[in-house]
Image: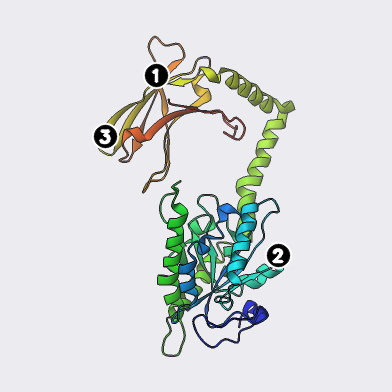
Amino acid sequence: VRSVRARLGSHLSGRGCPPETVALSETVLDPNVLTLGFARRFTAYKRPDLLLSDPARLARLLCDEARPVQLVLAGKAHPDDEAGKRMIRDWIRFAQDPRYRRRVVFLEDYDISLAQELVRGVDVWINTPRRPWEACGTSGMKVLVNGGLNLSTLDGWWEEAYRPDVGWAIGVGPVTESADQDSHDAYELYEVIEREVAPAFYGRDASGIPRAWVARMRRSITDLTVQYGASRMVREYLDKAYLPAAQALRERVADGAASAKAMAAWARRLESSWPGVHIGQPDFVRQTDGWEVSVPVYLGDIAPGDIRVEIYAEPTAGRAAEVASLSHDRPITGATGGYFWRGWIPGARPSDEYTARVVPWRPGVRTPAEIALIRWQK
């Protein structure tokens, strides 16, 4: 019996959800039942209530006679996060329902010590952030070395790590801002647990061993633990962020901060001249495998080398967002400060899904963090 189950107790021998009322002081978890863990900060974008969005469907999962599921949850909300606190109250209210008290437990005072128990005491770690807002999702990495498997939205580290033979995923496909994305992801979450996770856990050979499940655990441990952990995280932060940032700072402050002063003067010039920037009507010419596009841009006092012209398309169902940079082509005859930009866009989108835009550009300047200017085609 793994630590979290031993800590909470494990005396049940039946399946499903017993109908009788169970006292709060009684034990909760059964070591023979598929155990899902969910623990993190409770806030809206992490969607900790996604599994609770259809209580009736969740109840069927918990009380399935042949393949029951049990949940261990923990987490805290920021004192000013009313939505996060409401989600905690909703889960506690559900966990206190006598029908599910032997299948759901919400652990108080979530901290590092409790997290250590959780990541080595669950069969599957659940993570359901709204894409693309997940920074990393390190709690799922901690489960790996303990033999737990991941079921997560394809975001953060799991988007890179996921394979069907090491875990499960929801949110497959391009990111969209659709209003029903949460309900779609919730339905997919229930489906994956019911049709894939639970059958895999309860599929046993003649000796009672879930060999396919164990094979998935072994692949997860072998293939993922070396690649996804604190050592890689620190190394990549150092190589990709801290050292380049330190070098950029040294360059900016050299020679009495000459580079930084030049950048600041450049930014002031662009900000004062930016109202004079406007974009003409793009010309799209259909090719067999994309579009040839030409965009007239009028810069006023701004030099062509100080900006970048891009073609942008929003994400749609079945397609991710697209950004293509165009090349400076030639001046517009008879126009002061007018130039054509030209380029090629691969793909089969219709031309009316593309919009031209102008953004500042200068080597060493981070846009839009350091100069938040943009001009869209009207």
Q: Amino acid at mark 2?
A: Asp
In the displayed structure, 348 sits above or below 94; it is above
Percent x, y of residue 99? 55, 76
Drawn side of residue 129 relative to residue 203, left or right: right
Q: Amino acid at mark 3?
A: Gln
Q: Secondary structure at mark 2?
A: loop
Q: Which residue is mark 1?
A: 330
* Residue that appears at 51% across and 25% down: 307
Q: Secondary structure at mark 3?
A: strand
Toward which corner of the image does residue 362 lie, by quadrant?
top right
Q: Nearer the viewer, mark 3 or mark 2?
A: 2
Q: Closer to the N terminus: mark 1 or mark 3?
A: 3
Q: How many angstroms separate mark 2 from mark 1 (CA)? A: 61 Å
The N terminus: image quadrant: bottom right
* Residue that appears at 57% across and 86% down: 12
Percent x, y of residue 295? 38, 24
- Label annotation for residue 362: none
Percent x, y of residue 32? 53, 83
- Label annotation for residue 111: 2
Of 323 and 126, nearer the camera is 126
Residue lying farthest to the bottom in this orientation = 207
